[in-house]
Amino acid sequence: MEQENNILTVTQLTNLIKTLLEGSFSSVTLMGEISNYRPSGQGHLYFYLKDADSVISAVMFRGNAASLKFTPKDGMVVQVRGRISVYNQRGNYQIIITSMEKAGTGAIMEMLEMRKQKLAAEGLFDSKNKKKLPFFPDTVGVITGANTAALRDILNVISRRNPKVNVTILPAIVQGEDAAPTVIRQIRTANAYKMCDTLIIARGGGSLEDLLPFSDENVVREAAASDIPIISAIGHDTDWSLCDFACDVRAPTPSAAAELAVPVLTEFTETIQWYKNDFIHKITDSLSRLRLTLRTFTPQNLELYFRNIEQPYLNRFDDAVRSLKDSMQRIVEEKKQTVAKCIQDLENCNPQTIFDRGYSMVTTADGKILRDASTLKSGEILTIRPAKGSIQTKVL
């Protein structure tokens, strides 16, 4: 009877398992190999994750799948994060994935982020150090794999936009352990021999591991130290490498790099032709106006013109002369009056003038002027000097 009371339905058991699993494994991280990959038309991804001994069903819904930077495929080892869920209708458990990356990508990203911070702290990515691309390069250098789609795209774009631009191809290994040294060597070669005006470093798209040579520290330093402006075209739109930050310009694709490096010749020549026509039009218009103006410059018109200019100055000169004469006359009269007054003052101070009015000067025998009669003695001889002559007298 006790056993009968503990009898569960399949649904009840499944719900118990579902509650237990989903509560215990709300967030798990798994690593495994993708198997039986089946994307749906609605954008959901269905597949299995397996290792050597076990397998688990996996689903990644459209909203999370849209953020993937790669296309999953069978045999690919990935690292996923999600939660465990039980699919009631089939009675099996599965992992509902919220994020997925290639195995080892997390460690690589952490390493790249640390390297990026280190190089940024040294100033290798500063915008002030970026060089400006030449507007009309004579030669464009291309560092990329020989006979690759990236190279063909660049050559096609340059030949279409401006066939007069020379292209120097510096072939390099763009994947694997030997890639970084060859890229460094080609950057140095281009700079040492001044082989081009603009340098493009390019390769097609690939996984994060494929692009690692272009995040090599020595490659980044060499790109930052280049005297030749460099356009980085590593991978495609969503791909990136540390070289992108060190180069002077980043292009989303190799074709876009060629477009940035080379202007369209026809547009350039059309612009020059427009400026030429505009310049000729302006010069012709100016010459026409000058001819019309010169027609008025006859000898008679010139004489009248200069007289009109001269007359105001002559009037001003005559006015200045009259004003100067009046000022000088007034000053002379003032000075005459001053001199006359001085003469009058001098004449008034002249002793002879006093004598002429009937006054006389009396001196003693020793020539001293007599000012006080009480100082005289009887019998003393005095000399009286009127306006003319002199009189000697004796004090009685």
Image: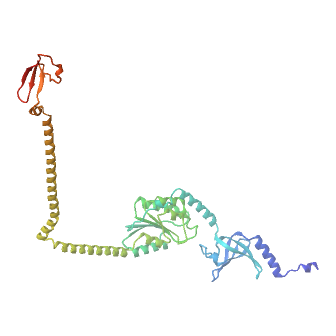
Q: Position of residue 184 (x, y in %)?
A: 49, 60
Q: Is residue 118 above or below residue 168?
A: above
Q: Is residue 109 left or right of residue 146?
A: right
The extreme left residue here reads: 389
Note whether residue 73 is visible: no
Q: Is residue 299 above or below residue 41?
A: above
Q: Position of residue 295 (x, y in %)?
A: 16, 73
Q: Residue at x 10, y 21 (%)?
A: 382
Q: Position of residue 55 (x, y in %)?
A: 72, 74
Q: Residue at x 54, y 57 (%)?
A: 121
Q: Quadrant of residue 98?
A: bottom right
Q: Is residue 219 above or below residue 152?
A: above
Question: Front-most of 98 and 351?
Answer: 351
Q: Is residue 226 left or right of residue 41?
A: left
Question: Front-most of 108 and 264?
Answer: 264
Q: Quadrant of residue 239?
A: bottom right
Tell me how many marks there are.
0
Note whether residue 174 is visible: yes
Q: Is residue 115 left or right of residue 259?
A: right
Q: Quadrant of residue 258?
A: bottom left
Question: Front-most of 139 and 134?
Answer: 134
